[in-house]
Amino acid sequence: MFSFEFMRNAYLAGTLIAIVSGIMGVFVVARNMPFMTHTLSEIGFAGASFGIFIGWTPLNGMLAFTTVSSILVGELSGAVESRRESVISAISGLFIGLGILFLSLSNKNSSYATNILFGSVIGISHQEVVQMAVLSVLVLIVLFFIFRNLKDDSFDAVGAKTNHIHSSIISIIFLVLLAFSVSVAAQIVGSLLIFVLLTLPAASSKYFAHTVLSMMLLAIGFALFGVWFGLYLGYITNWPVTFFIASIEAAIYGGALLYNSIANKSR
Amino acid sequence: MRETLISVENLSLNFPNHQVLSDLSFDVQRGEFLGIIGENGVGKTTLIRVILNQLKPSSGRIRIKDGLRIGYVPQFRNVDVEYPLSIEDFISLNFTGIKLPWLSRKEKQKIQTVIKQVNLEHISKRPLGLASGGEKQKAYLAQALINDPDLLILDESTASLDPNTKRELLDVVLRLNKELGLTIIFVSHDMQVIHEYPDHFLWLTKDGYTSGPISELHNDSKEGEYV
């Protein structure tokens, strides 16, 4: 399997994505932002299509759109709860529409759309793996420096306020990091299935681990397992890798919920 | 020797449509256990926010001793039953700043010390979401103790607790006050516990305020509990 360059690239890229997603996912779940992340990812779909339309790589188009919009989307988190969901629906709809428009204008066949929306492992070139590695390392370095303040703001927003942490600055930095992570993760699982890596592993980990660092390690473990095993199953069956990764992560999450309800009963 | 930590002189605070605090003067001395009491809406939390420098007074002034470290336990927290962090890790959240992500040995030791101070050793590894109301309040208290405060402010920390748990928490606070000399400001609308624990009181009402040593707090107010 590793004699094919595309499989080597896919494993390399998948490993990077799993690590970044596991770590970022813990904050996404703590900050209650799975749907915000999903919206960002749909904006990324429009960006990737736009990239194809003007001759960039999908990854660069995605990065441009998600980074710019992450700051605008951040304003939403302050919006009234009841309005937030509707605003998110409007934004998602608009950007998916734009994505379809750009694809149609660029006269590419529909397999491009499928690749961006549902992910593809065959399309990842060595150069893209390098770019993804650079982005991942950048995300990890910034996280390293803001880690403690981000942790306080994410897991105890009320307390963070009394610790004089600038919540709005932390939020913006986090959203830009999220934009990078979404763009990288979408390369494998596609922009419609961003939940699969940026939410599910972290959401599962919180039922087993009770410190931020151990939740991150476990989430990375769940994500890695899904990506590695999913790529392998995809290789031997020729079925879509995304299907396997999504099924594995959903199964882990289901198992975690089951474990939690059994543990609660015996308490 | 008396050492004044906070000195409030003729302080007033107006919101656009109404005045909350009017011509208020009082001092807080080191080692004091001050109970701030009053009905909802008289400005207890507003006063705390002035002390925390989150609000500026409209007139009058407040002087806070240079370098005074304040530990604050807010009234509300977003901790539901699925909240994943252990009590230990929750307490560690207060170690903020641009430092290594993992805790130093000194920080870990400090966490163990405050956990002992609030009697949570037996459940320190349990998720905070599964803790009882009293255990949660103790964890919040421990978190506020982590940076060695001179002054600890508790805002309605006992409001949702049953009488026994209330006493258990306040016994811990009283011990911190007596044994470590920690200065306490305890905000409550519960007359009973204000009579029992603090050594000074500040009673805010719609028309003004009274303050002094706890012995001067009217006895006939003992029965009344404000809601």
Image: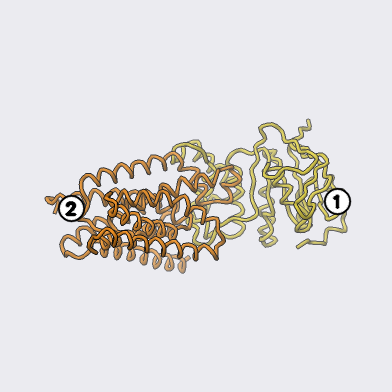
The answer to which of A238 and A84 lies nearer the viewer is: A84
Q: Residues within 10 Å of mark 1 (few under 14, many from 20)?
A: few
Nearer to us in this view, A124 or B24: A124
For residue B190, which numbered disc appears in the image? none
Q: Classify mark 1: helix, strand or loop.
A: loop
Residue, disc 1 = B208
Chain B, chosen colour in render? yellow
Q: Residue at x 47, y 36 (%)?
A: B99
Q: Nearer the viewer, residue B43 or A65?
A: A65
- The spot of residue B193 in percent (x, y) is 75, 55
- Percent of width and height locating residue A224: 29, 53
Please identify the quarter of the rendering in which residue A82 is found: bottom right
Cα separation between marks 2 and 1: 76 Å
- Asked whether the viewer can see residue A72, the reply is yes
Residue A126 relative to residue A210: left or right? left
Q: Which chain is orange?
A: A
Which residue is under mark 2? Answer: A7
Q: Name above or below for residue B33 compared with residue A229.
A: above
Mark 2 Cα within 10 Å, few/some/many (few <14, many 20+)? Answer: some
Q: Amino acid at mark 2?
A: Met
